[in-house]
């Protein structure tokens, strides 16, 4: 208590050696007649209680909405997980089907490719022989033309019907 008095004295420019100031002067106390304000306090208390009930009702409503939102979120999460699982399964099946299809086609295409390569190899091997035979036929045609000569030949007698008389 003495310190508070010293500070107060110093604040007012008084020396700390002066006589202490009574506490009643530093912090005056007020007495309130509680009995005279009882109805006002009750009204205020009732208004505060009403406000607290309103706030609690709002909080409970918000909690209910939050719980509903959490439930919806959980439901959506389950649906998304299920749909994702179904889609993943479908894609795996589709991939397997396409993979099998590609493998079968690759086998067939490889077999066809091998067959065509074999045919081309055969044709390349036969080409010199065919060219040799073609040259031989051309030579024979030239010989026949040379023997026959360049005179035109009439084949009319070969194409007219022969009449047999009895």
Image (tube, helix red, strand yellow):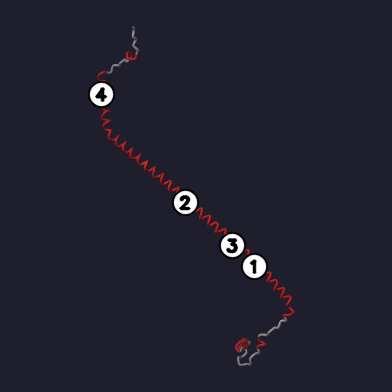
The CA span between labels 4 and 2 is: 74 Å
Mark positioned earlier in the residue sequence (2 or 1) = 1
Mark positioned earlier in the residue sequence (4 or 1) = 1
Q: Nearer the viewer, mark 4 or mark 2?
A: 2
Q: Secondary structure at mark 2?
A: helix
Label 3 neighbourhood size at 10 Å, few (<14), some (14-19), many (20+)?
few
Label 4 neighbourhood size at 10 Å, few (<14), some (14-19), many (20+)?
few
User: Is 78 placed left or right of 49 in the picture?
Assistant: left
Q: Which residue is mark 3?
A: 67
Mark positioned earlier in the residue sequence (4 or 2) = 2
User: Is 120 placed left or right of 9 in the picture?
Assistant: left
The percent coordinates of residue 150 (x first, y second) are 28, 18
The percent coordinates of residue 98 (x first, y second) are 43, 46
Label 2 neighbourhood size at 10 Å, few (<14), some (14-19), many (20+)?
few
Q: Is residue 92 above or below residue 7?
A: above
Q: Secondary structure at mark 3?
A: helix
Q: Secondary structure at mark 1?
A: helix
Mark positioned earlier in the residue sequence (4 or 3) = 3
Q: Circles 4 and 2: CB distance less than 8 Å?
A: no
The image's mark for residue 89 is 2
The image's mark for residue 140 is 4
Q: Which residue is mark 1?
A: 56
The percent coordinates of residue 140 (x first, y second) are 25, 24
Quarter placement of the N terminus: bottom right
């Amino acid at each position: 208590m003495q310190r508070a008095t010293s500070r107060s004295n110093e604040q007012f420019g008084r020396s700390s050696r002066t006589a202490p100031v009574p506490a009643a002067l530093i912090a005056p106390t007020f007495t309130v007649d509680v009995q005279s304000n009882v109805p006002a306090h009750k009204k205020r208390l009732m208004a505060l209680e009403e406000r607290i009930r309103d706030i609690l009702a709002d909080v409970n409503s918000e909690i209910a909405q939050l719980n509903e939102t959490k439930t919806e979120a959980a439901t959506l999460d389950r649906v998304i997980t299920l749909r994702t699982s179904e889609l993943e399964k479908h894609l795996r099946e589709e991939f397997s089907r396409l993979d099998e299809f590609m493998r079968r086609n690759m086998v067939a295409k490889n077999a066809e490719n091998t067959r065509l390569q074999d045919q081309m190899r055969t044709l390349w091997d036969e080409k010199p022989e065919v060219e040799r035979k073609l040259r031989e036929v051309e030579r024979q045609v030239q010989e026949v033309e040379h023997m026959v000569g360049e005179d035109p030949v009439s084949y009319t007698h070969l194409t007219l019907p022969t009449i047999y008389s009895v």
